[in-house]
Image (cartoon, grey):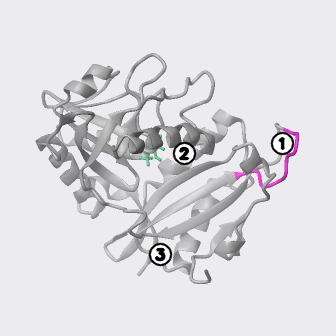
Amino acid sequence: MNDKPKVWLNNTIIDWQDARVPVLSHGLSRGSGIFEAFGTHVVGGDVATFRMDAHMKRMEQTLRLLEMEIAFSFDEIKQGVARMCEINGITRSLIKVIGYWGEEAVINLVLRSPLDIAIFTIPESPELGLDDDTPITACLSKWHKPDPGAVPVMAKACANYLPGYLVRKDANDRGFDLGLTLTCDGKVAEGSIESVFIVKGGVLKTPPLGNILASITRDSILTAARADGFAVEECPLEKADLFTADEMFSCHSGIKVIPISRFEDRRLPAPGPVTKNVSEMMKKIMAGNDDRFTDWFEKLYSL
Ligand SMILES: Cc1ncc(COP(=O)(O)O)c(C=O)c1O
């Protein structure tokens, strides 16, 4: 256990195994945690994060949506990420910044204290499967995306991953890698931990923001694809669009483009021609070889 990376907890450095919460903490017993997850990459001899500012902005948005506060500034959190990556000798990794009420709450639902903050730097491993863009299969989940009137689905809240768990389990039980959900009004939403794109008639399409997580990868693909002259539409998608798509892929911070080779009983080219171009575009950016987007990387330390 001692070779596990050190953890930043409320500006103190502790051992991985000491990063615990009481079972009756609000974070666990009420499921009130929030988090951000993003990658570190080796670019030109430096270890750098990808769009850490955008992730911090999304965390700020999550806190606003849930009317919660934290005791640290986003600059302090960013400095904590840089410090822990250097201390732990991190290269390619997944960073998880988690906010939670560690205090016990037996009856009390509404706590007024700021959230505790923990930063984990998790080195790449086969389990994480970072950058593994082997094609996968997908199905339409029997579960809907929660109604945004009941829970803010744009918040990156741990509780929003209980529905995500059900979606993924339903898909896996039916022999698929991932499930895609519809919103309560029947429009295409996203997967459990991923956004979805389809290609139809040469146009790259993805659902608009509102009922989905504001994925940083989705935004990066849209921005870069528009800059590269792809035909791109953020538009409501019907269930039928999934069944008639020419190509389909999912994306998240860990793997920028994951081709989908089968949706329900329909085989799809994986990667299809547009997906292949998007994938190559993102690989060039992630290698630090696209000058237009090098400011998406924030240097943490030199190797
Ligand atoms: C529901 C959901 N959609 C989309 C994504 C992709 O977001 P990002 O690109 O910021 O990793 C995630 C990531 O965890 C997610 O949980």
Nearer the camera: disc 2 or disc 3: 3
Q: Can residue 79 be seen from the camera position used here?
A: no
- Magenta range is 100-108
Q: Are marks 2 and 1 in contact (CB under 8 Å)?
A: no
Residue 212 shows up from this direction: yes
**Mark 2 secondary-structure assignment:** helix
Question: Which of marks 1 and 2 precedes in the sequence?
Answer: 2
| Element assignment for label 3 | loop
Q: In the image, which disc is placed on residue 178?
A: none
Is 145 magenta? The answer is: no
Residue beneath disc 3? 90
User: Which quadrant contains ligand 1?
Assistant: top left
Q: Amino acid at mark 3?
A: Ile
Q: Is residue 208 above or below residue 302?
A: above
Disc 3 to disc 1, C-alpha distance: 35 Å
Q: Quadrant of residue 191?
A: top left
Mark 2 or 1: the one toward you: 1
* Numbered circle sitting on residue 57: 2
Which of pointers 3 and 1 lies earlier in the amino acid sequence?
3
Callout 2 touching callout 3 (CB < 8 Å): no
Q: Please name whichever residue, 105 or 99, is drawn nearer the observer in this view of the structure.
A: 105
Q: Which residue is mark 1?
A: 112
Disc 2 crowd rating (10 Å Cα; few below 14, some 14-19, many 20+) is few
Secondary structure beneath dot 1 equals: loop
Q: Is residue 113 left or right of residue 139?
A: right
